[in-house]
Amino acid sequence: MTKGGDFMDERIGHYSFIVGVIIAIVAGLFPQMMESTALLLLVLGLIVGFLNVSGRESSGFLIAAIALLVAGGVTNFSVISWQGLGAILESILTNITNFVAPAAVVVAIRAVFALAAER
């Protein structure tokens, strides 16, 4: 692949990440949008995993993704009842984990293949 193609892949991955985070936050503010945005977040997460995370960034990305996914699974924002803030925070975190999880799966599989190829 040419350098121009690599640059374009980086840009697509970069913008996919930004758009994914924005969509996750906006959809979290409006919980009725969560179902309609779940597939979009999944696709954007896959794009980020394939195009935005390089080999040298894999370990850091996977550690951050694991921390985020664990925190998203055990955090209970529903106890914050002021103006429905807890439900909004929970929706945002759910959307972000729906976005990050597919990227983490792609990066983890690539890391496993890279480790296996070294032997």
Image (spheres, helix red, strand yellow):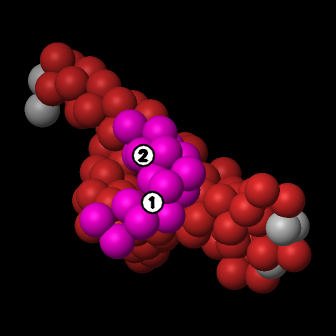
First in sequence: mark 2 vs mark 1: 2
Residue 81, compared with residue 29, is above or below; it is below
Give me the residue at 69% from left, 81% from top: 73
Q: CA distance from mark 2 to mark 1?
A: 9 Å
- Prevailing secondary structure class for the magenta stretch in the rendered image: helix
Q: How many marks?
A: 2
- The answer to whether the residues at label 2 and label 1 have Cβ atoms under 8 Å apart is yes
Residue 14 vs residue 28, the one in the foreground? 28
Q: Quadrant of residue 15?
A: top left
Indicate which label's residue lies in the foreground, 2 or 1.
2
Whole-percent x, y for residue 37 in the image: 33, 60
Residue 2, compared with residue 79, is above or below; it is above
**Mark 2 — residue?**
23
**Mark 1 — residue?**
99
Give me the residue at 78% from left, 56% from top: 83
Residue 92 in the magenta stretch? The answer is no
Whole-percent x, y for residue 36 in the image: 28, 65
Give me the residue at 17% from left, 17% from top: 4
Please tell me whether mark 2 sits on a helix, a strand or a loop: helix
Q: Is residue 57 left or right of residue 41?
A: right
Q: Taking the image as drawn, is residue 118 in sight?
A: no
**Quadrant of image for the N terminus:** top left
Q: Which residues are magenta?
A: 19-36
